[in-house]
Amino acid sequence: MGFPSFLLSKYLTLRKFYGLMKKEVEYIAQISIDSLWAGRKHIEWNLQKGVNVLSGINGIGKSTILNRVVAALHSLRVVDGSLQTMMPGLQLQFVPADAEELHFDIIRSFDRPMSQVELIEKAGDKEIRSELDWELYQLQRKYLDYQVNMGNRMIELLQRGDEDGRRLAAEVPALKTRFLDIIDQLFAETGKKVMRKCNELRFEQQMDFLGLYHGEGS
């Protein structure tokens, strides 16, 4: 049986009076990230107490920002009487500023983290941490198979030893170029381009190299 409501209220009041209760965060007022993509991007996100929405086109960095924030929340420590994140390059401002405790929940849908058992069953790739990463990993494998098949097709055509075979073999790489051009067009607004000399689908953005994970699949 629980406490009667009036006893519970008195109990909490006494704890607060004697300083036994830590002051809790009401909400996060601002998120600042000054080391996004190797320090080339600075983000300042001012939040309100109610619902806040982060929106943007695919590949712009929404998942990257949110994953950084989640990591920062897990690193929180009380320093000089207030909560501070231990994650370099990321600052969180709380209301009230002198709060010492934060309760939060992380809710994910398709991008939920995978358990250790699932990771072992799926693959040994350390980059695979969620169901979405697994789906993208499988797409990468299909892309590698596509390149192998394309190379085998070129060899087959060249082994014919005739002019028509050489002509057709020379046309095969154009199909891959067209495919990569289409991807570049889809991600044009993000400033990302596919790295043409890489065997995997990887993106280059302002000299930063990004794998096909999280945001690129949403």
Image: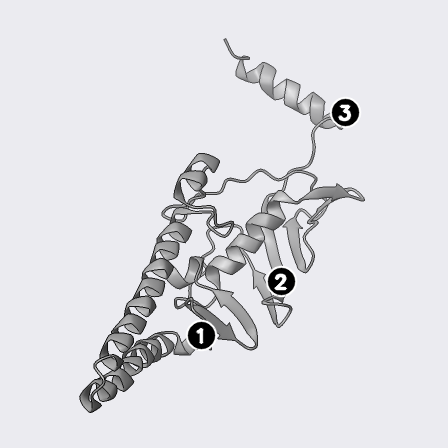
Amino acid type at mark 3 = Tyr
Identified at 51% across, 75% down, the residue is 205
Depth-wise, is mark 1 or mark 2 nearer the camera? Answer: 1
Relative to 8, residue 48 above or below: below
Total labels: the figure holds 3
Query: Identity of the amino acid at label 2?
Result: Ile
Mark 3 vs 1, N-terminal side: 3
- Quarter of the image where the C terminus is located: bottom left
State yes or no: discs 2 and 3 in contact (Cβ < 8 Å).
no
Report which quarter residue 189 is drawn in: bottom left
Based on the displayed image, in which of its 4 quarters is residue 36 positioned?
bottom right
Amino acid type at image mark 1: Thr
Label 3 packing within 10 angstroms: few (<14), some (14-19), many (20+): few
Residue tagged 3:
18
Q: Secondary structure at mark 1?
A: helix
Q: Looking at the image, is mark 1 or mark 2 earlier in the sequence?
A: 2
Residue 63 location (% of width, % of height): 47, 58
Q: Return the residue at label 2.
A: 33
The Cα atoms of the two marked residues, 2 and 3, are separated by 37 Å
Q: Count neighbours of disc 1 (C-alpha within 10 A) and say few if under 14, some if 14 to 19, many if 20 or more.
A: some
How many neighbours does mark 2 have within 10 angstroms: few (below 14), some (14-19), or many (20 or more)? Answer: some
Residue for badge 1: 190
Residue at the image point whose x is 35% and y is 76% from the top: 180
Decide if residue 177 is on the left or right side of residue 20: left
- Between 119 and 208, the residue placed more toward the observer is 119
